[in-house]
Image (spheres, rainbow, N blue to C red):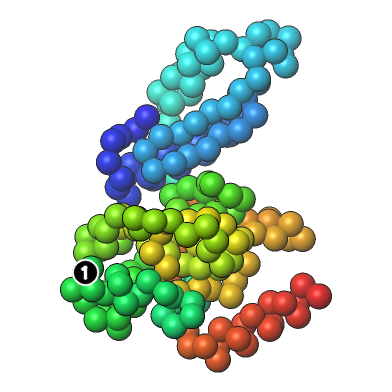
Amino acid sequence: DFGQEISAETGLMCLSAAATLRAAQIPGVSDIVPSYTAVALFYSPGTQKEPVTFASLSKEVSRILSGELLPANASSRSIKIPVCYGGVHGPDLSDVAKRTGLTEDEVIAKHSASDTMVFSLGFSPGHPYIGIHDEIFAIPRRDVPRTVVPRGSVAIANRQSTIYPERLPGGWHILGATPLRLFDLSRAQPSLLLPGDKIEFVPIDQREFDRLSAEIDGARA
């Protein structure tokens, strides 16, 4: 654990620690997953010649993290995410505007105003958790979650954004949608976004959304 509150500083520390632990290639560790405030290590106690215990692993992790950490942004990228806001793609845009006291255009402008960062992936393959937005977007999730959220939906809650990589249930406020595919097993790197990536949401209209969708579907055919 590296903190109790979501912040860019804590998120970068988690990414840095995760990068350092991955580079150490600790025997028995099968996965290392950074989040907003913590890093999880998954390990198999019985797969090594020397048994891996919680105590021995904790000692090794403490030793590694007491040294110099790798930079969190060593492999970070800047990625533009085209978003068609409102209409059929953003059923909650009007409600978010009312909750925040903004116009719909102002919500779009603020959501796309500054770069944000992918803090972690979770819930579903390629499903990013992105932050941190203006404090005006510190709104809770919907009281009643949707049983189905369309693929590509861009949603917001608690100063964070997420993009649904597939049709999934969800309780975040949907502002729009992107034609990009967040997860595709045919790619060398299936997940479009990775922790540490800098994200810029770019407003597009329906015509551009349709054009990009056709282009992406054609490339996959």
Considering every residue shown, the one lying at the far bottom of the view is 207
The answer to whether residue 73 is visible is no
Q: Where is residue 10 in the image (x, y as percent from the top left)?
A: 33, 42
Is 165 above or below relative to 70?
below
Determine the image quadrant of residue 135. Answer: bottom left
Is 53 placed left or right of 197 in the picture?
A: right
Q: Where is residue 151 in the image (x, y as percent from the top left)?
A: 58, 66
Residue located 77% across and 60% down the image:
186
Residue located 29% across and 70% down the image:
96
Determine the image quadrant of residue 209. Answer: bottom right
Comparing 77 with 113, the one in front is 113
Q: Which amino acid does label 1 sit on?
A: Thr
Give the quadrant of the N terminus.
Answer: top left
Residue located 23% across and 73% down the image:
98
Q: Where is residue 127 in the image (x, y as percent from the top left)?
A: 54, 54
Q: Name the residue under label 1.
A: 100
Comparing 4 with 102, the one in front is 102
Q: Where is residue 146 in the image (x, y as percent from the top left)?
A: 47, 59
The answer to whether residue 186 is visible is yes
Residue located 39% across and 43% down the image:
36
Comparing 71 with 93, the one in front is 93
Determine the image quadrant of residue 118. Answer: bottom left
Q: What element carries label 1?
A: helix
Give the quadrant of the C terminus.
Answer: bottom right
| Crowd tier of the residue under label 1, counting other residues whose Cα lies within 10 Å: few below 14, some 14–19, many 20 or above | some
